[in-house]
Image (cartoon, rainbow, N blue to C red):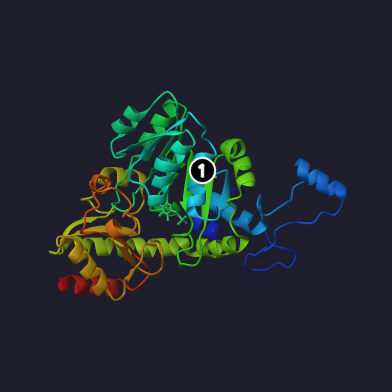
Amino acid sequence: MSTPRRFRTATELVHGGINRSQYGETSEAIFLTQGFVYQSAEAAEARFKGEEPGFIYSRYANPTNDMFEKRMCLMEGADDARATASGMAAISAALLCQLRAGDHVVAARALFGSCRWVVETLMPQYGIETTLIDGRELANWERAIRPNTKVMFLESPTNPTLEVIDIAGVARLANQIGARLVVDNVFATPLLQKPLELGAHVVAYSATKHIDGQGRCLGGVILSDQDWIDEHLHNYFRHTGPSMSPFNAWTLLKGLETLPIRVRQQTESAGRLADFLAEHKAVARTIYPGRADHPQADICAKQMTGGSTMVALELKGGKAAAFAMQNALEVVRISNNLGDAKSLITHPATTTHKNLSDEARDELGIGPGLLRLSVGLEDIDDLLEDFDRALAGL
Ligand SMILES: *Cc1c(COP(=O)(O)O)cnc(C)c1O
């Protein structure tokens, strides 16, 4: 259950949801405990009946996790949240807790690899029908609707080509048929895009990315309105146990304190790098949601307040050039992770998206020369010089 919002986002991300112990510590306490003791047998009975507030078992809820969940609710404008062990635990729980055999899901085909596996491979094993579409056109969502469509699912901007999907438009279609829209908001970050305000019903994050932002721990979080959490997620979460470690909740609380300044700086640097790359003769295509030449610049302007910390670029020289450039970079490191203080670059065709068929990769625009860049907190001039040097060698 969330606490009422009193201050602006940056202030709530430092103070929001804090629950101090009897010692009055400044920094949030880490409650590394599995269970809790009761003053009496009567108190235990009352707590299990829900007649008395308090914690029962850390698989259900924990004071440190509770602070993280409340702070996330304040940022997202959600009634309630559940913190999970990883982003995939969040996405799979957000989808599976509300679906049953015979239901149908429509999802955009441009998804994080493991999300696509959950939709394409796992769900059909449980009798859930799924349709993957090119999510950029609203008409494709409308055409895919069946009488048993219960959930629509998308991420925007997408991984790795930073396509953008009209969240408000898809939410309208979902509402027309009484279905729910689940949005994976990792690439946009909770600061640059507010899916619940755009009409989505459920938002899920990999907190591993920008929320930690310093490469330390895995985590995830699911946010929605109280009715949805109570009806669909509450029991699923308690009894399947995707819970976050309290230590990770503490690490992520510290991450939230600095999230606004990190995302602002990384987004500004990403914009500068995108402008530089777009002008370079070795680069065939630069995709950045903050640029006027983004294919869906109008939707970006409507639903995002910044271009994100991610840039996609396609080199003219194909795989050989993509590998040579990655190997020549001295500041930017080669890694499939993202949202980190360290700038990271990956070649999706041979790493994150290697398991897709050639046809599926072509559909998504993942060519041999495509690279995905996550912009970090280094000095922008060092990043610009790093690319300038690495590209000059091609
Ligand atoms: C990383 C990521 C996930 C999965 O998160 P984990 O914390 O690695 O489990 C899901 N969706 C997107 C868009 C991601 O970037």
Hey, which quadrant is residue 245 in on the image? bottom right
Q: Residue at x 26, y 64 (%)?
A: 272
Indicate the secondary structure of the residue bearing disc 1. Answer: helix
Count numbered badges in the picture. 1
Q: Quadrant of the C terminus?
A: bottom left
Q: Name above or below for residue 347 compared with residue 149.
A: below
Q: Name above or below for residue 117 compared with residue 8.
A: above
Q: Residue furthest front?
A: 125
| Kind of residue at badge 1 | Ala
Q: Residue at x 42, y 64 (%)?
A: 262
Judge left or right: residue 295 versus residue 60. left
Q: Is residue 6 visible?
A: no
The quadrant where ligand 1 appears is: bottom left
Q: Position of residue 338 (x, y in %)?
A: 39, 61
Q: Nearer the viewer, residue 354 or 164?
A: 354
Q: Nearer the viewer, residue 67 or 215?
A: 215
Q: Which residue is mark 1?
A: 94
Q: Position of residue 48 (x, y in %)?
A: 77, 44
